Image: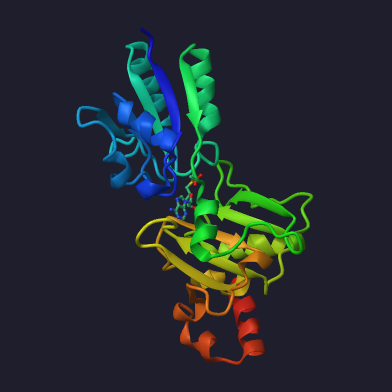
Amino acid sequence: MPGKVHLVGAGPGSADLLTVRAAAVLRAAQVVLHDDLVTPEILALAAPDARIVNVGKRCGNRTNSQGQINQAQINALMIWHARRGKAVVRLKSGDPAVFGRLGEELDALRKACVAYEIVPGVTAASAAASTAGITLTDRNSASALAIVTGHNIRGDKLRTPGLDPQRTTFAVYMPGPDYNKTARELMEAGVDCNAPVVLISSAGRANQKTCFMSLLDLPFAGGVAAPAILIVGEVARRVPGEQGIDAREFLPPVLAESDENRSDVKRLELLA
Ligand code: SAH
């Protein structure tokens, strides 16, 4: 019997945010090929005799000194196991269709005539919005949601063609570690320097952290732990009494203490 590959979204990290379908497919898998961001508590759902392989390759696509494997090798592994009749799960964090190289893997499976099925997952933007207690769209202030990345394979700048930055929520995946660059590119794309933003690290996990600030403060967020996602726009304005910390916790004292207008000038100077 030919095998099959399930391309499964593991959600943001905690097992109770996995879909019921994803959990069932994972329990039935004989081979699990997973990315770095998939957490141990999700992997623990696999059968004890399942073969579990970390094919993670943070920040790049090359084989590195730790022997991490590249995209072509991941494709070959999926196909090899499926052709030997195995039930294969290709497990990715969040939703497999969002910054998950799903297109390349689908191409390879189609070319190899291997059966596959996609199981969606909760993407980081949705998990982060719920962690921060905010909405992603709002009929008064955010009629569009743009899913963008701070990094891409060509090293291009963050681009937002045709969107009104004043009425759009930007969910910026991979926004660090150079938050200065991300802030500058958002401003170049037309986002106001005082626009509210919220940076959420480890959304949907026990150690999640939420930092509300303005775009001007973003360059100082370097110490925020990965994985983190940035939500930009009116929806990210902190509601008084809502959970989360504000930027003053990581701003240099000279900025945190200076009066509002002078500190804005200083922040802009540091961004330049
Ligand atoms: N397919 C994934 C995205 C993979 S790209 C999804 O749909 O969520 C990896 C980036 O996703 C990270 O650099 C980070 O920006 C974001 N991310 C993934 N999991 C996250 C989490 N639990 N909390 C915050 N950001 C997360």
Q: How is the image coloured?
A: rainbow
Residue 65 visible here = no
Q: Is 85 displayed left or right of 127 in the figure?
A: left
Left or right of 249, for residue 232: right
Point 42% across, 47% down: residue: 17
In the picture as drawn, the residue positioned furthest to the front comes out as 20
Q: Nearer the viewer, residue 34 or 59?
A: 34
| Rendered position, 104 above or below 138 | above
- Relative vertical location of residue 99 with respect to residue 220 in this rendering, above or below: above
Q: Nearer the viewer, residue 244 or 147?
A: 244
> In percent of the image, x 50 and y 40: which residue is there?
95
Is any atom of residue 254 visible in this view? yes
- In the rendered structure, the answer to whether residue 194 lies left or right of residue 24 reads right
Residue 242 x %, y %: 52, 74
Q: Position of residue 96 (x, y in %)?
A: 50, 37
Q: Quadrant of the N terminus?
A: top left
Pinpoint residue 106: horizontal percent, then vertical percent. 52, 24
Q: Is residue 105 above or below residue 252?
A: above
The residue lying at 33 percent from left, 36 percent from top is 68
Count of number-bearing discs = 0
Residue 76: percent from left, percent from top: 39, 20
In the image, taking residue 47 as reference, residue 127 lies left or right, namely right
Placement of the C terminus among the 4 image quadrants: bottom right
Q: Nearer the viewer, residue 13 or 159?
A: 13
